[in-house]
Image (spheres, rainbow, N blue to C red):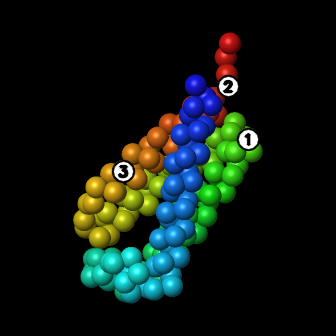
Amino acid sequence: MKAFQSTIASILLLLNGLGATYGGWKLITRPDGSSMRMSVSLLEQSPFQDFLIPGLGLLVFNGLPSLIAFVGMLANPRKFAWAVWVQGIILCTWITIQVIMIEMLHPLHLVCVAAGLVLILIGRNQSRPKFN
């Protein structure tokens, strides 16, 4: 069962890591959001004038750490269970803040929060000692 959970966590970390790294990079290189077909009008209620800072945050706090946790899970799932748990918390927090700031809920937000909750549960379960 733990092997299956590790596989699920690895897939979620890889997908989140690749998506957040790609999205973050696109927002950094084109802060007007045009490369992602997004308008800066989404940020009207936020403290940001463009997507540069959100893009940096997405890359640094969500994308790269998810990829690092993914590699760690491949190497030693039990040792990196804490990283799975942390990335789940980061993902849920990121999406919650994003929804509050842009004052809009997209179905993808719900998918991301669900993935974050799964990562939290798997990370918690993977870090528990195995009893025979």
**Residue at point 69%, 52% (across, down):** 71
Which residue is under mark 1?
A: 76
Q: Nearer the viewer, mark 2 or mark 3?
A: 3
Q: Residue at x 63, y 44 (%)?
A: 82
Please state, as top left, top right, bottom left or bottom right, where the N terminus lies in the image: top right
- Write the residue at 52% across / 48% down: 12
Is residue 60 shown left or right of residue 55?
Answer: right
Horizontal side of 98 relative to 125 (left or right) equals left
Q: Secondary structure at mark 2?
A: loop
- Of the residues shown, which amino acid type is indicated by label 2? Pro
Amino acid type at image mark 1:
Asn
Task: Give the labeled residue for mark 2.
Answer: 129
Tell me: 103 left or right of 108. left
Q: Are marks 3 and 1 in contact (CB under 8 Å)?
A: no
Q: Nearer the viewer, residue 93 or 16?
A: 16
Query: Which residue is rendered at x = 50% and y = 37% of the image?
Result: 121
Whole-Å distance between the Cαs marked 3 and 1?
Answer: 27 Å
Q: Say which residue label 3 marks.
A: 111
Mark 1 nearby-residue class (10 Å; few <14, some 14–19, many ≥20): few
User: Residue 109, how many percent across, how many down?
Assistant: 34, 57
Instruction: Residue 11 in the image: state x and y as whole percent.
Output: 55, 47
Q: In the rendered view, would you say 33 is above or below 91?
A: below
Depicted 34 relative to depicted 54: above or below: below
**Numbered disc 1: secondary structure:** loop
**On screen, residue 95 above or below 126:** below
> Badges 2 and 1: C-beta atoms under 8 Å apart?
no
Q: Quadrant of the C terminus?
A: top right
